[in-house]
C-alpha cells in the first residue's frame, strides 16, 4: 500500500507548489505528464519514463505502456492519488519523465535533426525552418502551453524562449498544450540582451507583435522566406528594446467600436493564435506536415 509520505512517490509530491516544483524538477531533471494522451505523447517523443502513478481504472488502458516498467508502476486508490498530488487528478494517471538537454538556439534555427523527437517529419529531418515564434518573458505556464499548442497546430517550425520565459515542461504547460510541447522544437536563449541578433543573423525577418494600431496590420505585412514573430509578456508586451530591434512592428487590427468602448487588446494566447495563422500565410508548412 502507498501513502502520501512514501519516499518512492517523492516525484509526485506538492504538485501545486509552483516554486518548490520548479526547483525540484530542475534539480532532479524530471517533469510530470498528466493523463493517458499526454503520457503517450511524451513517450512517443522519446522521453524516458521514471515511474507512473495511476488509479486502478487506468491500469488496463495503459497496460501496454506499463509493460516493462516493473516496480516503477504505482497503482493507488483515488483518495491516495489526491493526497499525494494535492488535488483531484481527473485524468487518473501521472508519469514522472526524464528531461533531456535542450538544443542550443542555433540548432532550432537550422532545423538540425538533433531537435526533440516528434518535432521534425521523419521523411525530411533537418528541414530548415521558415516560421518561428520568439517568446519574451511569458511567465504564465498555462499561456506558454497554449501558445505551443497554437504554434504546433498551425505549422510553426520552432519556438525560441527568452531566459525568463516559463518552463514548457512544467506540468501545467504540458497539460494545457495537450502534449504539443513535445511536437515542436524549442530552445532557450542564454542572453536576452543580444538574443535577437542570433536570429537575425540566421536570415530571419523579425516581426514584433504589438497592440499599437499604427503598426502594420499582420495580414498585410510583406513576409520574407524566413520570419520570426516576437510575442511579449502577458501584461507589458514586448520590451522597448525588442520593439526597436525588430525589422517591423505588426498588429492585429481591432474593431474601432470595441476600442471606443475600452477593449484595446487581446490576451496573449488569443493574439498568438491569430498571429500564428497570419504568420503561415503563403507557406505550405501545414500541408507538408501531413505528407508521409
Image: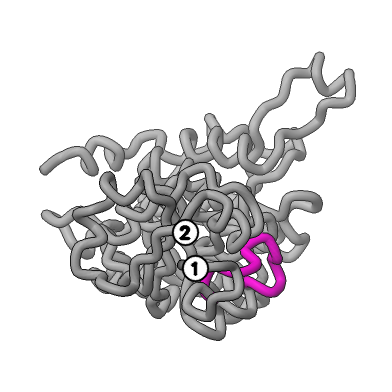
Is tag 2's residue or tag 1's residue first in the polypeptide sequence? 1
> Vertically, is 201 above or below 181?
below
- Could you tell me which residue is drawn at 47 percent across and 44 percent down? 91
Asked if residue 224 can be seen in this view, the reply is no
Span of residues in magenta: 10-21
- Could you tell me which residue is drawn at 70 percent across and 66 percent down? 17
Residue 249 belongs to the span the image colors magenta: no
Q: Secondary structure at mark 1?
A: loop
> Vertically, is 87 above or below 43?
above
Question: Mark number for residue 199?
Answer: none
Check if mark 2's residue and mark 1's residue have beta carbons within 8 Å. no
In depth, the one of 4 and 184 nearer the eye is 4
Asked if residue 220 can be seen in this view, the reply is yes
Across and down, in percent, residue 129 comes to 33, 57
Across and down, in percent, residue 111 comes to 30, 65
Question: Mark number for residue 159?
Answer: 2
In depth, the one of 277 and 95 nearer the eye is 95
Amino acid at each position: 500500500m502507498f501513502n502520501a509520505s512514501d519516499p518512492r512517490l517523492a516525484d509526485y509530491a506538492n504538485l501545486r507548489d509552483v516554486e518548490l516544483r520548479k526547483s525540484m524538477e530542475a534539480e532532479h531533471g524530471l517533469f510530470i505528464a498528466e493523463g493517458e494522451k499526454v503520457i503517450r505523447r511524451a513517450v512517443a517523443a522519446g522521453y524516458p519514463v521514471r515511474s507512473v502513478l495511476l488509479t486502478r481504472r487506468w491500469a488496463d488502458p495503459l497496460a501496454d505502456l506499463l509493460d516493462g516498467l516493473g516496480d516503477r508502476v504505482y497503482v493507488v486508490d483515488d483518495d491516495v492519488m489526491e493526497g499525494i498530488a494535492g488535488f483531484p487528478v481527473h485524468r487518473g494517471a501521472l508519469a514522472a519523465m526524464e528531461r533531456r538537454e535542450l538544443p542550443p538556439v542555433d540548432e532550432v534555427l537550422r532545423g538540425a535533426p538533433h531537435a526533440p523527437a516528434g518535432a521534425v517529419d521523419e521523411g525530411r529531418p533537418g528541414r530548415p525552418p521558415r516560421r518561428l515564434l520568439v517568446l519574451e518573458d511569458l511567465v504564465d505556464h498555462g499561456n506558454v502551453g497554449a501558445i505551443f499548442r497554437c504554434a504546433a497546430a498551425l505549422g510553426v517550425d520552432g519556438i525560441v524562449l527568452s531566459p525568463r520565459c516559463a518552463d514548457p515542461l512544467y506540468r501545467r504547460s504540458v497539460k494545457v498544450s495537450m502534449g504539443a510541447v513535445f511536437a515542436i522544437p524549442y530552445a532557450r536563449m542564454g542572453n536576452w540582451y543580444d538574443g535577437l541578433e542570433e536570429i537575425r543573423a540566421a536570415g530571419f525577418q523579425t516581426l514584433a507583435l504589438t497592440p499599437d494600431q499604427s503598426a502594420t496590420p499582420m495580414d498585410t505585412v510583406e513576409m520574407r522566406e524566413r520570419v520570426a514573430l516576437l510575442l511579449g509578456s502577458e501584461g507589458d508586451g514586448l520590451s522597448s528594446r525588442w520593439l526597436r530591434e525588430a525589422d517591423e512592428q505588426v498588429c492585429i487590427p481591432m474593431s474601432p467600436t470595441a476600442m471606443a468602448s475600452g477593449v484595446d487588446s487581446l490576451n496573449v494566447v488569443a493574439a498568438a493564435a491569430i498571429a500564428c495563422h497570419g504568420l503561415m500565410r503563403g507557406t505550405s508548412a501545414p500541408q507538408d506536415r501531413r505528407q508521409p
